[in-house]
Amino acid sequence: MSQLDTVHRILDAAEVLFAERGFTETSLRTITSTAGVNLAAVNYHFGSKKELIQAVFERFLTPFTEHLDRELSRRASADQQLKVDDLLQSLYQVALGGLASDGRDPKRFMRLLGLAYTQSQGHLRRFIVSRYGASYQRFAGLLRVALPDIDPVTFYWRLYFMLGATIFSLSSFDAIEAILREDFGAESSLDETLARLAPAAAALLTAQD
Amino acid sequence: MSQLDTVHRILDAAEVLFAERGFTETSLRTITSTAGVNLAAVNYHFGSKKELIQAVFERFLTPFTEHLDRELSRRASADQQLKVDDLLQSLYQVALGGLASDGRDPKRFMRLLGLAYTQSQGHLRRFIVSRYGASYQRFAGLLRVALPDIDPVTFYWRLYFMLGATIFSLSSFDAIEAILREDFGAESSLDETLARLAPAAAALLTAQD
DNA sequence: TCGGTATTTAAACAAGCGTTTAAATTAATG
DNA sequence: CATTAATTTAAACGCTTGTTTAAATACCGA
């Protein structure tokens, strides 16, 4: 088993287990035994549990933000000015397609994104802001341009409302889907849900108050 | 120090610390030393840490759902049929006023509510559903009646979108508020934010897709 | 094939966790 | 006031945690 294998296997196991149980509730022993590697491998290859958590996020946030940046540039060169719907479509399309193309579960990333927000983990928030803050600022800036009539404070609160609706519902996708399937017998796929979320989020952002 | 004092002090300390750090990250030793009581007091009075967590939620969810039930009944007897805006106003008004009247911080309850959703804690979810599920069902049912034209699956997804926007943004209220204060110099109070959230949530629920 | 580096391994470490125990103290009851 | 019950206390329990150590093994360029 080469080094790359070990690092890879640890990241794969950690990603799944963190998404399922959270960071504190997942021990290094669970991760390493799931990955089939020695306990000390995490500290050897990553340094600490904190750095492993950051590495898990780096592995999916870097492709995600790169995809998003490309998609935004592509749309920006096509259209004169990006509208709210364009921006939301870019965001959700990249969340769905850009990540799924790696062959990994996009729902899991939503769940991790939710955890990053809610399980305070100061180091993780700092890591994400310093590494991916620029992409976020770009998206927020474009959205601001598309909504010039709203006063700035209201705009930013609505941005957080929108992020809340997105992250919260998608990070609990499996649980919510199970409830609806039981009550209505109708299965909801992730892209159907995003197709429902997009117009609702647009309405939230553009509401008249 | 009487028994009531001890129980009270433990609940007060646990409530604050849980809201700040989450359940797993808060030890009984931190709670009891903050409360100024002996370590064994938690197990003596509550049985276990899990039951303490449930007791913390019971102490604010019981008054909350009672207030909400009363408020819904009051509005229902006044108006013929409750509209979306009425229902959202009831919800947010009770969240703000009904809890604040106890002299305790409503933001903290939002934070705990967010934790209840995100920090899986199976026992807590079961506890809340079994104890307060009826109130939730009543509110959801009234909202459903107020939005008869939306297909049921879309309606329920939008309900979760709305809950996500609410819980997520309010449970991070202090953090978001600090960012906006730094960027715009404008302070946001909780009731101002709820006044912003209400129309945005209504637009989300009533959107045409 | 040899020598040095990189990696894996099993074991141990100290620290923190929730919980239990039994004795000491306080409160309540007859 | 004496006795019983309720509560508080300090100490210890067994267990899990993240991390470190030093020896064993694998790998790789010369």
Image (tube, coloured by chain):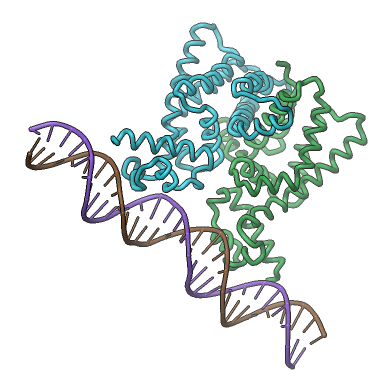
Chain colours: A cyan, B green, C brown, D purple
Viewer-side residue, A165 vs A12? A12
Tell me if residue A43 comes above or below residue B202 in the rendering. Answer: below
Residue A138 at x, y percent in the picture: 50, 21
Quadrant where the image shows the N terminus of chain A = top left
Q: Quadrant of residue A170?
A: top right
Q: Position of residue D4 (x, y in %)?
A: 73, 83
Q: Tell me residue B198's x, y (percent).
A: 74, 30
Q: Residue at x 85, y 38 (%)?
A: B72
Residue A186: name its quadrant: top right
Q: Residue at x 41, y 45 (%)?
A: A33
The percent position of residue A103, horizontal first and vertical second, equals 46, 24
Quadrant where the C terminus of chain A lies?
top right
Left or right, residue B149 beside residue A121: right
Q: Nearer the viewer, residue A189 or A81?
A: A189
| Residue in front for this viewpoint, A189 or A140 | A189
Left or right of A149 on screen, residue A35: left
Image: A139 above or below B27:
above
- On screen, residue A104 above or below A126: above
Residue in view at x 59 percent, y 13 percent: A83
- Residue A153 visible to an observer of this rendering: no
In the rendered picture of this protein, how many numbered marks are placed on residues?
Answer: 0
User: Residue B112: in sight, yes or no?
Assistant: yes
